[in-house]
Image (tube, helix red, strand yellow):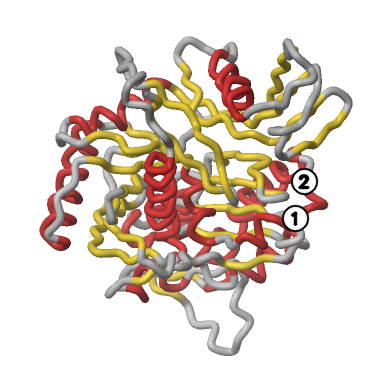
Amino acid sequence: MKNYIAAIDLGTTKIVALIGEKTESEYYRILASCELKSAGIVRGEIENLQDITDLIKKCVDELKKESKLEFSEVYMGITGQHIRCLNESVTELRNDETSLITQEEIDALRQKMYSLQKESSEEIIHVIPQSYSVDDKTEIRKPVGMRGKELTGNYHIVIGKTSAINDIKLCLQNNSLKLGGLILQPVASAAAVLNDNDREIGVAVVDIGGGTTDMVIYHDSIIRHTALIPFGGNNVTADIKAGCGIPEKTAESIKIQRGSCFGDTSSNNTYIPLNEKKEISPNDLSEIINARMNEILGGIMFEIEQSGFADKLNAGIVFTGGGSMLKNFTEFAESQTDMRIRIGEPADISSDLEQELAQPSYSTAAGLIIEGFAHASSIQKKPIDENNRKKPSKPVSIWDGFKNGILFEYDKV
């Protein structure tokens, strides 16, 4: 296994590229980083392939120059309005109910889900095991070694547009790179900000990005629900721009420097200059921000209710992403959700830029590094019989499983 991994987070607002190594103490050290203003991405989806191809080249060149390392494989995140999720089950009648259930049977059962009926323009990205049933026994986590006639697998399925997936691959190919693994962005963010206890007792991770707000829910260390809300920090900026009649760049600067989810009730409630002739009160600015954040939180709470795990999230909601960095956001979210709230920052990550990278806006990129090592480790541990190895006409991507909420993808050979 390589001792370093490269990953790129294609965000609507910015692109973050990292190359990192895993230390003996199970920490992840970032060897080089690159951050560029994004272009050619709308609400998480690639719109202009040339723009993204050029940005990836700049990122890769910078990583190689800074780290003095060579690589040809990159781990990428995926999000966008094209993503949809559903829960499905599949049942297999076993030939010999007295024999023990094997791991091969479990793998074959999950592989059947890739034949699930879907639109011709779609592709299954993830098949995430939830639980199993053996005859009349339900909610089984590990059926291997049990006996029974009827084996049922319950799965959470993540589906995306084939064109969106191919766009990511093409932008990499244009830079002589190949895709090491494709990871749902909220899963990557969760890998960076959660601990094992969070996943076990129940938690929702919400990543408020520039173009979208992504969510993943864990309970009993299993991914139970994923969702995407088509609003993010850029919508707050757009509202300020429209409400104040100012350029987008000015609106973004005011949001970051003076924006708050609550009005300012202090005696120093001075007006905020917009330009040479216009100004706005902090309370009026907060009302603009408050309205959009209320809408985003409403979508989040709807998805939590839909998941069926609203009363099982004992760790509450962990917010991350740049949109969670607004002033007073934690208090605002607590008042609107009546749940335990905390802001998640990348953990177990070290770097010469540690303070800069330990920000919610870097959670997805850091999580892609963590997921990348999980994937590489799974390949290293997978035994291969070279005598019976057959090379397929093309790679078949499947999911090799999950551990503590970390997913990884590999090419089956």
Tell me if 236 is positioned left or right of 32 in this view.
right
Choose between 266 and 113: the one closer to the eye: 113
Residue 382 % position (x, y)? 43, 37
Q: Nearer the viewer, residue 102 or 316?
A: 102
Q: Is residue 62 above or below residue 170?
A: below
Q: Residues within 10 Å of mark 1 (few under 14, many from 20)?
A: many
Name the residue tied to disc 1.
313
Q: Residue at x 80, y 26 (%)?
A: 134
Identify the residue under disc 2.
309
Amino acid at the residue labelled 1 = Leu
Q: How many numbered marks appear?
A: 2
Q: Position of residue 380 (x, y in %)?
A: 37, 43
Q: Residue at x 59, y 15 (%)?
A: 116
- Residues at discs 1 and 2 in contact (Cβ within 8 Å): yes
Whether residue 278 is visible: no
Q: Position of residue 241 (x, y in %)?
A: 42, 54
What label does residue 329 carry, if any? none
Residue 176 location, quadrant: top left
Q: Quadrant of residue 401?
A: top right
Q: Amino acid at mark 2?
A: Phe
Alpha carbons under labels 1 and 2: distance apart: 7 Å
Q: Quadrant of the C terminus?
A: top left
Instruction: Using the image, determine if residue 366 lies above or below residue 356.
Output: above
Q: Nearer the viewer, residue 309 or 394?
A: 394
**Percent of width and height locating residue 390:** 33, 16
Q: Element at badge 1? A: loop
